[in-house]
Image (tube, helix red, strand yellow):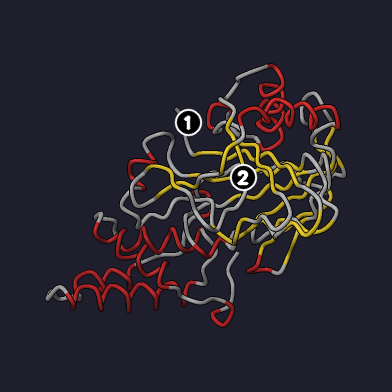
Amino acid sequence: MSKTASAQTVTPELRQWIVAQAEAGCAVDAVLQSMRAAGWNEAVAMDALETTLRTHLENKGLSPDAILANLAACQPEDPAAQPAVPDLGLENSPLYVDGGDRRVAVLGVMALPRVVVLGGLLSDEECDALIAAAQPRMARSLTVATQTGGEEVNDDRTSNGMFFQRGENELVSRIEARIAKLVNWPLINGEGIQVLQYGPGAEYKPHYDYFDPAAPGTPTILKRGGQRVGTVVMYLSEPEQGGATTFPDVQFEVAPKRGNAVFFSYAQPLPGTKTLHGGAPVIAGEKWIATKWLRQQEFV
């Protein structure tokens, strides 16, 4: 998963995350291990750690020598110790995967970011039923407020939406069980399905689904089930134009084909996972999607 140094940029967000880990008492080798697991080139990660920690400690009037000395002792990460994440069993490049009650087509696979495009995850009848059940409860979409741990209206997200409770009805339970089977992840680790409606001009600008570790509200959010580690976006209707799910870091987009879905996972809450993504503006028509986020532990 490693990339060359020239292919990676150390962002202010990454530096903030490094400082947050240090302030939380994480050992330098543990932070480096997390960066490696997220796909960071070791040379880039080492340089980012050294410069960030040195500047941070010097600004506090402390000597950085003791902490930075630990960098020399950092060993390559044991692959077996990498965090578990949801994923599909795609050994031997199958054309279809088992969703328990439905065979689902594999239309495209990417390693970094880990993206799998799925065909026919939902039937036409299931798409229509989700829209019908959601319509009476639609309201302006909110985003998680990582500064407070609550929710807020965000100008980057101009859709209407609602949440089903996990297992709220037979239709929701059936789809949740199918997703859990496909991505080999406990059903109870999933958030409730969110249904979103995008009219002409509506979009969701590029963002990460994991919760920013440096944000003050994140510890409160994580109490409900830990970090998000995977996302499934299901397309319930097709706009006439626009509305693709985009991955700007790798210049990849998924067309919003009714019944299809895109799955992606992220082992660490870091930009190095390349999971920056967005919902491109709808140019004509209307787009309905259903999103399922997966957590590290049971979501309560």
Badge 1, how many Cα within 10 Å: few under 14, some, many 20+? Answer: many
Against 189, residue 14 (above or below) is below
Q: Nearer the viewer, residue 163 or 81?
A: 163
The disc at residue 148 is: none
Q: Nearer the viewer, residue 84 or 149?
A: 149
Against 201, residue 91 (above or below) is above
Q: Residue at x 69, y 33 (%)?
A: 179
Residue farthest to the left, as pictured:
61
Q: Dividing the picture into quarters, in which one does residue 8 lie?
A: bottom right
Q: Amino acid at mark 1?
A: Phe
Q: How far is disc 2 from disc 1 in space, using C-alphas?
A: 14 Å
Task: Point out the tag, 2 or 1, that comes first from the N-terminus.
Answer: 2
Residue 246 falls left or right of residue 13: right
Q: How far across and how far down the image is residue 43, in percent?
A: 46, 77
Name the residue that disc number 2 marks.
Answer: 231
Name the residue that disc number 1 marks.
Answer: 299
Q: Amino acid at mark 2?
A: Thr
Residue 135 falls left or right of residue 230: right
Helix, strand or loop for disc 2: strand
Residue farthest to the top, as pictured:
170
Helix, strand or loop for disc 1: loop
Q: Quadrant of the N terminus?
A: bottom right
Q: Quadrant of the C terminus?
A: top left
Badge 2, how many Cα within 10 Å: few under 14, some, many 20+? Answer: many
Q: How far across and how far down the image is residue 3, in percent?
A: 59, 72
Question: Do callouts 2 and 1 mark residues in contact (Cβ within 8 Å)?
Answer: no
Q: Residue at x 46, y 64 (%)?
A: 76
Q: Nearer the viewer, residue 244 or 35?
A: 244
Residue 275 falls left or right of residue 200: left
Q: Dividing the picture into quarters, in which one does residue 141 lie?
A: top right
Residue 51 falls left or right of residue 277: left
Q: How far across and how far down the image is residue 113, in percent?
A: 64, 59
